[in-house]
Image: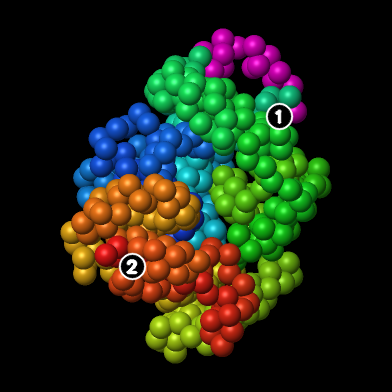
Amino acid sequence: MNLKDTSVYKILIAIIVVVSSLALFGGVMEPDSALYASIAKNMVLRNDWTNLYVRGADWLDKPHLTFWLAAAFFKVFGINAFAYKLASFLFGLLGAWYVYKLAKAIYNEKTGLISVLIFLSSLHVLISTFDVRAEIYITTFTLAAIYHYYKAHTNSFWHLIAGSFFAACAIMIKGIFVLIPVFGGFIIYWLLTKQWKQLFKPKWWIAILLILAFIIPELYTLYIQWDLHPEKLFFGKQGTSGIKFFFWDSQFGRFFNNGPIKGKGDKSFFLHTTLWAFLPWSILFYTAVVNLFKKNNRLKLPAESIIIWASAVITFLLFSLSKFQLPHYILIILPQFAIITAVFLQKLDGKILRIFYNIQMVLAFLIVILLAAIAIIFQVDCKYFSIGIPVILLLASILIFKGIKTQILIARSAFISVGLMIFLSGFFYPSVLKYESGMVAAKWLNENHPNAKASVLNYGDAYSFDFYVSGEAKYFWSYEELNKFRDEKELVIYASESELERLKTEYHAEVLKSFEYYHITKLTGKFINAKTRPQVLEHFYLVKIN
């Protein structure tokens, strides 16, 4: 292939974007993705953009912006999975644009393009395009804030305003901890380069004031829903301050493990999470990090590089020390990982380049073998076709990109990701989603009983049912509550197997249809193996009260 490097990278980025868009046409996964989608749906149905509701009750755990963005797309495209995913997808592309802008500003255009390619083709970004959560938004807004603050060093006041706006957006997605990846890199950069006087420059304090001004919509809605109503219950307690929760409990409470939501914590968690989350680039990334420990290697880089790796280091350490850890948190600093890897890749030559070339090829073959094994053991739909596509793409990358060069190593690695995304979005996830009983039940109910009044009995995790069913599902938390509505016509209940016998005997319930269920974001060997899968499946039912 005789195209110049930058052209090859642009073509590969375009391919990754197109293939990633396949995820837009898949279902919404439980728990988080379906939960957030159902909150945004209720926002539109109730025409209430101030209060957050889950299962018909007040909800506090996350700030509003994720739901405002999804609800805005529902208003334009209708309440459906495509609209919900499209919002995240487009903001993810905006994040990729800022990866390019920041890397180009500190290094050069080529580094910017390679960084974008690495970021968009890393496994957890690909997964997050299908299983949409809040982290893609945070990633975009934090990186946009870093870029504009970087430009504010020497450029117009408008960059300071833009940086503060995006920092505020990140806060209104997750909370004030997002300021650590935004400002952490700058503070370490100023200290290491003896620019500590920057800490006292008025413009940075103005930036903080601007952030506070931009988050007023969030503070206002929290005050209206919670602080004005101390009688409301949160985790069984009254007198909850939404503003206090926003500034303290939701962030520091999780970090120190003394808030209402607790975790266990493992200091090595994100070390091994990065190994799979940043595939196929993780081995290169870890080598790049080791390379940064050598002072001579750091001295060869622009001084502003400190902003990138310091932001990543301080956030990674914070995540690792926290007691509350989830794999998708690592998304927030994958842009920094991508830039660090892109810079390192361009320095490879000779024997070292050949070593990593061989490592990436071995990795490619291992991934294809693993996908083939999963397809056969799981018995995905069109399993031989699903195996054939990654195999063909691997062979195509070998035939198209020949020679041992950095460009070839990058291109072949990108083709691994293309195969991964097609396999996941086109075959694996659609097969897995058959066991998301809430979604399947809601779709069946909409089609076969369009006038039904949907409800859920004694089950709190029916988020996909809540999202996909027409209208807003009603929740019954006891049989006493159900008794008040038992004479209502067209009442259909979504219930677990444990409730079925009582519904049949006391309410003469008619089973409309049964559905198989599994917690699909916690895959185990027994579930993946089609032969042992029935052992771990639960059953849910749609029943009609007669």
* Residue placed furthest toward the left: 451
Q: Within 10 Å of the Cα at label 1, are there few (<14), some (14-19), or many (20+) other Cα atoms? A: some
Name the mark nearer the viewer: 2 or 1.
2
Report the number of discs: 2
Q: Mark 1 points at which residue?
A: 188
Q: Residue at the spot x=73%, y=24% of the render?
A: 191
Residue type at mark 1 is: Ile
Q: Residue 508 carries which label?
A: 2
What is the span of residues highlighted in magenta in the rendered image?
192-208
Give the side of residue 365 with respect to residue 318, left or right: left
Q: In this view, does 202 lie to the left or right of 166?
A: right
What separation in Å lies between label 2 and label 1 (alpha carbons)? 68 Å
Q: Is residue 223 left or right of residue 525?
A: left
Tell me which residue sits at (49%, 34%) in the image.
60
Whether residue 467 appears in this view of the structure is: no
Q: First in sequence: mark 2 or mark 1?
A: 1
Quadrant of the image containing the C terminus: bottom left
Q: Which of 15 and 77 is in front in this view?
A: 77
* Majority SS type along the magenta span: helix
Q: Residue 221 magenta-drawn?
A: no
Q: Which residue is drawn at 50% across and 40% down?
A: 138
